[in-house]
Image (tube, grey):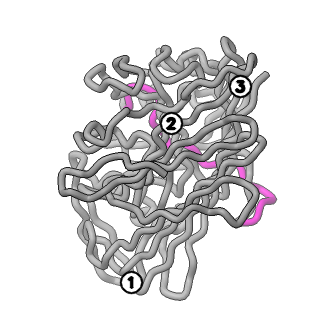
């Protein structure tokens, strides 16, 4: 553990480094539970940071597109910042045009989490906890959330999420890391080879809110069932690509034969120059693939280089966006006596 700094409000922020026997390292800060770096080997064993982020707390506090952060209470978008539960309507803070995004004005990404190093296992780990008070950002119920990061000796970063509530509420947690398997600041992700285990995706309207349809990926730029370069579909004339300025869609994962708490393969990424691979396994029903469309050169990362369009990609495991307003989507309702549980694993390897 090391001191990382103090927020503008004077709150101390700590940094923890998880290091396994293979030399891989993951650093996490208690502000937003942010993963500030992931140092993974290439085919020659050389380590490089493959996660976008900053070198100081000041830059994280100044604003950023959720680099490495825990997002909640509700990851992704809720249309109009409104939802109804048990006959009562709740109004959330609208922080993106007409919707509430990633928990609102001060979501989980901007909160100080309480840390506890996990020393009872064979692998290095860190548990972060936070109580979200009833009414915070408009959400009902006191929510006790816990997120655990564990780095295994076979270079897998496991993230376990749990939560309980004392009143009916909605919950959808994820981590919003941006990856570049070339290395942070080393170029675009357009030549990365992507696989997504999804036959369907959720098309959106002009505000990037799902319409409620589950559309087939076959014959569209969203068909990543077989590995292909990300660049292949970015110049498509498909209306959904034009709306998002690239890829920013939720994919309904193929989970046939799996129980709700069983890990299933969601995505694979391969970078051919240095040979790094990453697989994503999750218990979640969906994954948001975002190709870094809104990185515009105004942010300078830890390497001292500007982040421009396509310099990182996000693969956010999740329940579907706007699920509280789409009853046909998997439910995100959590009630007293129930326990929210979700796990995602990012497995790193080389060719």
The CA span between labels 2 and 1 is 41 Å
Query: As drawn, which residue projects farthest toward the left?
Result: 9
Question: At x 60% / y 47%, what residue is drawn?
Answer: 18
| Label 2 residue SS | strand
Question: Do we see residue 198 in this rendering?
Answer: no
Q: Residue 227 carries which label?
A: 3
Q: Check if mark 2's residue and mark 1's residue have beta carbons within 8 Å.
A: no
Looking at the image, is 195 positioned above or below residue 84?
A: above
Observer-side mark, 2 or 3, equals 2
Q: Which mark is residue 37?
A: 2
Q: How many neighbours does mark 1 have within 10 angstroms: few (below 14), some (14-19), or many (20 or more)? A: few
Question: At x 33% / y 78%, what residue is drawn?
Answer: 140
Question: At x 34% / y 83%, what residue is drawn?
Answer: 87
Question: Do we see residue 342 in this rendering?
Answer: yes
The mark nearer the N terminus, 2 or 3, is 2
Residue 33 x, y percent position in the rendering: 44, 53
The CA span between labels 2 and 3 is 26 Å
Per the picture, the main secondary structure of the magenta-coloured stretch is loop
Observer-side mark, 2 or 1, equals 2
The mark nearer the N terminus, 1 or 3, is 1
Nearest the viewer among 349 and 153 is 153
Residue 20, by quadrant, is: top right
| Residue occupied by mark 1 | 86
């Amino acid at each position: 553990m090391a001191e990382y700094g103090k927020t503008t409000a004077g709150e101390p922020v700590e940094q923890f480094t998880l290091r396994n026997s293979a030399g891989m390292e993951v650093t996490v800060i208690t502000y937003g539970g942010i993963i500030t770096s992931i140092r993974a080997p290439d085919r020659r064993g050389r380590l490089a940071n493959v996660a976008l982020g900053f070198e100081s707390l000041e830059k994280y506090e100044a604003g950023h597109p959720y680099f490495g952060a825990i997002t909640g209470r509700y990851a992704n978008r809720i249309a109009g910042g409104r939802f109804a539960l048990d006959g009562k309507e709740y109004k959330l803070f609208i922080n993106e045009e007409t919707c509430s995004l990633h928990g609102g004005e001060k979501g989980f990404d901007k909160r100080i989490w309480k840390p506890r190093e996990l020393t009872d296992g064979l692998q290095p780990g860190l548990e972060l906890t936070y109580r979200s008070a009833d009414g915070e950002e408009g959400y009902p119920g006191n929510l006790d959330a816990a997120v655990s990061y564990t780095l295994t000796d076979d270079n897998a970063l496991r993230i376990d999420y749990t939560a309980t509530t004392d009143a009916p509420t909605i919950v959808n947690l994820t981590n919003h890391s941006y990856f570049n398997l070339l290395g942070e600041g080393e170029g675009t992700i357009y030549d990365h080879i992507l696989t997504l285990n999804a036959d369907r995706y959720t098309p959106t309207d002009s505000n990037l809110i799902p319409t409620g349809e589950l559309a087939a990926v076959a014959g569209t730029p969203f068909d990543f069932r077989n590995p292909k370069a990300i660049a292949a579909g970015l110049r498509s004339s498909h209306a959904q690509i034009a709306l998002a300025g690239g890829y920013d869609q939720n994919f309904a994962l193929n989970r046939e034969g799996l129980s709700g708490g069983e890990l299933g393969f969601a995505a694979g990424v391969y970078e051919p120059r240095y040979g790094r691979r990453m697989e994503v396994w999750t218990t979640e029903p969906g994954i948001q693939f975002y190709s870094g469309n809104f990185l515009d050169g105004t942010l300078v990362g830890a390497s001292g280089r500007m982040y421009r369009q396509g310099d990182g990609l996000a693969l956010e495991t999740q329940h579907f966006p706007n699920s509280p307003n789409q009853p046909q989507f998997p439910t995100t309702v959590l009630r007293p006596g129930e326990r929210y549980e979700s796990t995602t694993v990012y497995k790193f390897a080389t060719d």
